[in-house]
Structure formats: C-alpha cells, structure tokens
Image (cartoon, rainbow, N blue to C red):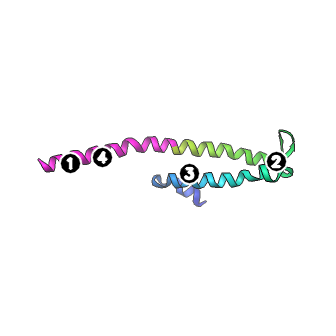
Amino acid sequence: MALGTLWLFGKYTKIAFVLLCIHMFCTFLPMVLLLDATWQFTMVLTRVGQYIVMNLVLLASAYFIFEHWQSLRKPIVEFQKASESVGRELVLD
C-alpha cells in the first residue's frame, strides 16, 4: 500500500519504480527456487506460477508510468531553467 501511495506523488515516482523492481525480483524468485510450486510440466504453470507471471504486466505498467512521467517532467524542468535565466537577465539589465 505504501508503494502505491508513492506513485501518487510525482517526485517519488523514481523511488517507487526502484522499490517495485526490487519487490518484483523477490516475487520472481519462486519461479527458480520452488519449481514444484510454480511449474506442473515444462512450460505449464500452476496457479501460483500464473500469478507470478502476471506480475510482468504490473512491471510493464510501472515502467510505462515511469518513462511517461520522465518525458513529461523534462520539458517542465527545461522551462523552469529558461524562465529563471530570463528573470536573471531582466534583473541584471
């Protein structure tokens, strides 16, 4: 729940994405360590394995949000820097 709350605030998106990646890595460990619980046969997942693989969708969505936020933030930061430099020029003149 705390991780989801971090996504609500733009300046914490990078932290939320890193924490989500760490969480997803730990979530995928049973696919390698607990083969009996996640695989029935070759390429046939159990219900637990299906839920673990479903987390790929969550990770892909989080990556999309993170990249989209970065692309939206970049022009705003550039605009702020440009407006600050114009403000300084006006004060100096």
What kind of residue is marked 3? Phe
Which residue occupies 49% across, 41% down? 68
> Which class describes the residues within 10 Å of circle 3: few (<14), some (14-19), or many (20+)?
some
Q: Is residue 89 above or below residue 19?
A: above
- Residue beneath label 3, please? 17
The Cα atoms of the two marked residues, 1 and 3, are separated by 35 Å
Q: Nearer the viewer, residue 32 or 50?
A: 32
Q: Main secondary structure of the magenta part?
A: helix
Which residue occupies 43% across, 42% down? 72
Residue span colored magenta: 67-93
Residue at the extreme left: 93
What kind of residue is marked 2? Arg
Q: Earlier in the sequence, mark 4 or mark 2?
A: 2
Q: Earlier in the sequence, mark 4 or mark 1?
A: 4
> Which class describes the residues within 10 Å of circle 4: few (<14), some (14-19), or many (20+)?
few
Left or right placement of residue 79 versus residue 19 in this view: left
Left or right placement of residue 57 versus residue 79 in this view: right
User: The N terminus is located in which quarter?
Assistant: bottom right
Residue at the extreme top: 43
Q: Earlier in the sequence, mark 3 or mark 2?
A: 3
- Residue beneath label 1, please? 87
> In x, y percent, where is residue 70?
46, 44
What label sits on residue 47 in the rendered view? 2
What label sits on residue 36 in the rendered view? none
- Residue beneath label 4, please? 81
Q: Is residue 2 above or below residue 13?
A: below
The Cα atoms of the two marked residues, 3 and 4, are separated by 26 Å
Q: Is residue 56 magenta?
A: no
What kind of residue is marked 1? Gly
